[in-house]
Image (cartoon, rainbow, N blue to C red):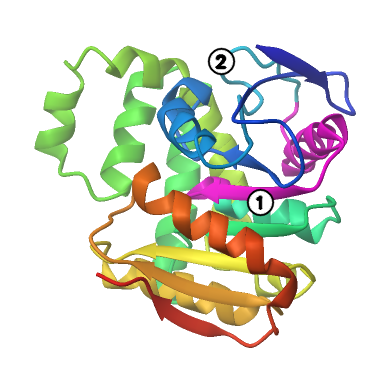
Amino acid sequence: MLKVTSADGTAIAYERYGEHGADSLIVVGGATCDRAKTRPLAEGLGAHLPVVNYDRRGRGDSGDSSPYAVEREVEDIAALVNDLGADVILYGHSSGAALVLHAAAAGVPAKAIVLHEPPFGADTDEDRQEARDYAEALTTLLSEDRRDDAVALFFETTGVPAEVVAELRHEPWWSDVVALAPTLAYDSAVMGDRSRGGILPMEVAARISVPALVLSGGESPDWMIEVARAAAAALPQGTHLVLPGEGHIPSSQTLAPVLTEFIARRGTVDGAVTDLRTPG
């Protein structure tokens, strides 16, 4: 395990896979994920390219500071990029993709970005209100230190039936997720649940000048694929790619050739939105 110090003095823990060198891929996990959760993906990708897997602040072996701000997490990524001292591609999964979006727009010097199923909501009054209601309820539960209920709320909000969540509470891994419960508020802030109603920040995407690949799983819900397509359209150099047979959680076997090809050709992306599907 390695550590780097972020701008506010917070220690950020990370590990490396694959041969060190140019074009390192930084894996930015989503909600309920620390680097232990993203390690299998990082290890799998590390057989094909250099990979950095890190604990976002408040998770695993990384430190934290208060009050939370999305800008601090952007600074964490900037510290990692600076520490690597090489060309970097940012890969964000789920709400981690939204964090990558903010980091790239803030000027973190990545050569390219990959956004894997950023879960922004539809731009409707109903969906925006649902995101704001979730943020308020989550804040209340965490303020009362009801971490178990906060995790249950998160899963139910993502579509897991309440009766299934009740069963999940007895799974051996549940306590590990509960330990990360306070960071659910961080992901909610990154998604803009309260500030924007959880919709895609078009003005943020428009500021990103590097090539961007937006990925969807072919087995994912239609709304998630449409959000990814809209994100690619909002990015000046955006490409949308659907991975047949994949859902929200990617497999390194499918992802590795897609990422290596994108990295190899990133300098030739022409800025036009392309909607592609891998052979399947």
Q: Quick one: quadrant of the N terminus?
A: top right
Region rendered in magenta: 67-96
Horizontal relation, residue 153 to residue 66: left or right = left
Q: In the rendered view, does 279 fall on the left or right side of 171?
A: right
Which of 145/10 is in front?
Answer: 10
For badge 1, the amino acid type reads: Val
Residue 75: x and y, percent?
82, 37
Q: Secondary structure at mark 1?
A: helix
For residue 221, which quarter of the picture?
bottom left
Disc 2 target residue: 60
Residue 61 at x, y percent in the picture: 62, 12
Q: Residues within 10 Å of mark 1 (few under 14, many from 20)?
A: many
Residue 154 placement (x, y as % from top left): 36, 39
Gap between marks 2 and 1, in whole Å? 20 Å
Is residue 10 within the magenta segment?
Answer: no
* Residue 194 drawn above or below residue 280: above
Tell me which residue sits at (9%, 35%) in the image: 163
Quadrant in which the C terminus is drawn: bottom left
Residue 33 in view here? no
Crowding at dot 2, Cα within 10 Å, few <14 / some 14-19 / many 20+, comes out as: some
Q: Residue at x 77, y 57 (%)?
A: 111
Disc assigned to residue 270? none
Percent coordinates x, y for residue 213 in the rendering: 57, 66
The residue pinned by badge 1 equals 100
Question: Any magenta on residue 86?
Answer: yes
Q: Is residue 160 left or right of residue 42?
A: left
Q: Is residue 7 above or below residue 175?
A: below
* Residue at figure coordinates x 47%, y 26% from the top left: 39
Is residue 134 among what the camera can see?
Answer: yes
Residue at the (66%, 75%) spot, across then down: 235
Q: Looking at numbered disc 2 in the image, what kind of residue is underneath it?
A: Gly
| Mark found first going from the N terminus, 2 or 1 | 2
